[in-house]
């Protein structure tokens, strides 16, 4: 059994942040790119991620956007946590599709940052768009 303790210090490596995120690992998410203020995370939709209608469950798409949000707002070196996130779904995604979440900071201050995350399918079509507000702890 692995026990995780609350982490005080910020991550300097976003690959380590995603690796230590159990939701990201359970869903097979991969950090594709990260630089200060932006990132890309991708995931292949599996059968166990589908809702009763055979489309990707909204919670799974939200989780992908949330991991991209975390990597984006933490990429500047300050420990950042979510204060709020809103997501709008545009089209369904299906089993076997690869979804990519691209996050970028729209506005960053000393204590808060606003990030936008766009989730697209393999054809580049918009699946969802999310806006997150992060609190920077230092």
Image (cartoon, helix red, strand yellow):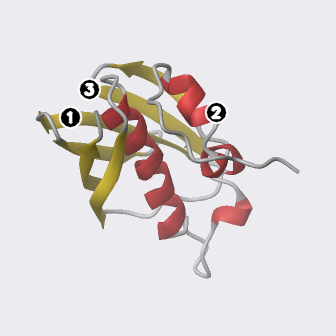
Residue located 68% across and 43% down the image: 25
Instruction: Tell me: residue 34, above or below residue 69.
Output: above
Q: Seen in the image, is 32 located left or right of residue 90?
A: right
Q: CA distance from mark 2 to mark 3?
A: 19 Å
**Residue 7, x across and y down, in percent:** 54, 40
**Residue 42, x across and y down, in percent:** 52, 37
Q: Seen in the image, is 13 located left or right of residue 37?
A: right
Q: Which one is in front, 37 or 128? A: 37
Residue 95: tell me if it is visible: yes
Secondary element at image label 2 = helix
Secondary element at image label 3 = loop
Label drawn at residue 63 = none
Secondary element at image label 1 = strand
User: If the image is split into quadrants, where does the C terminus sit?
Assistant: top left
Instruction: Tell me: residue 57, above or below residue 24.
Output: below
Q: Which residue is mark 1?
A: 105
Residue 125: tell me if it is visible: no
- Say whether marks 3 and 1 touch (CB < 8 Å): yes
Q: Which one is in front, 114 or 111? A: 111
Q: Which residue is mark 2?
A: 19
Instruction: First in sequence, mark 2 or 3: give its number.
Output: 2
Residue located 47% across and 68% down the image: 58
**Residue 133, x across and y down, in percent:** 22, 52
Residue located 28% across and 54% down the image: 129
Q: CA distance from mark 1 to mark 2?
A: 22 Å
Q: Which residue is mark 3?
A: 37
Give residue 30's quadrant in the image. top right
Instruction: First in sequence, mark 3 or 1: give its number.
Output: 3
Q: CA distance from mark 3 to mark 1?
A: 5 Å
Tally of marks: 3
């Amino acid at each position: 059994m692995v026990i995780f303790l609350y982490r005080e210090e910020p991550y300097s490596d976003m690959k380590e942040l995603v690796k230590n995120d159990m939701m990201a690992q359970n869903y097979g998410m991969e950090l594709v790119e990260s630089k200060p203020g932006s990132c890309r995370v991708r995931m292949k939709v599996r059968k166990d991620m589908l809702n009763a209608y055979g489309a990707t469950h909204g919670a799974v798409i939200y989780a992908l956007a949330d991991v991209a949000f975390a990597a984006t707002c933490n990429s500047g070196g300050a420990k950042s946590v979510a204060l709020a996130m809103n997501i709008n779904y545009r089209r369904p995604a299906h089993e076997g599709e690869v979804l990519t979440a691209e996050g970028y900071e729209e506005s960053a201050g000393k204590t808060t940052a606003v990030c936008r995350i766009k989730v697209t399918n393999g054809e580049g079509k918009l699946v969802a768009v999310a806006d997150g507000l992060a609190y920077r702890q230092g």
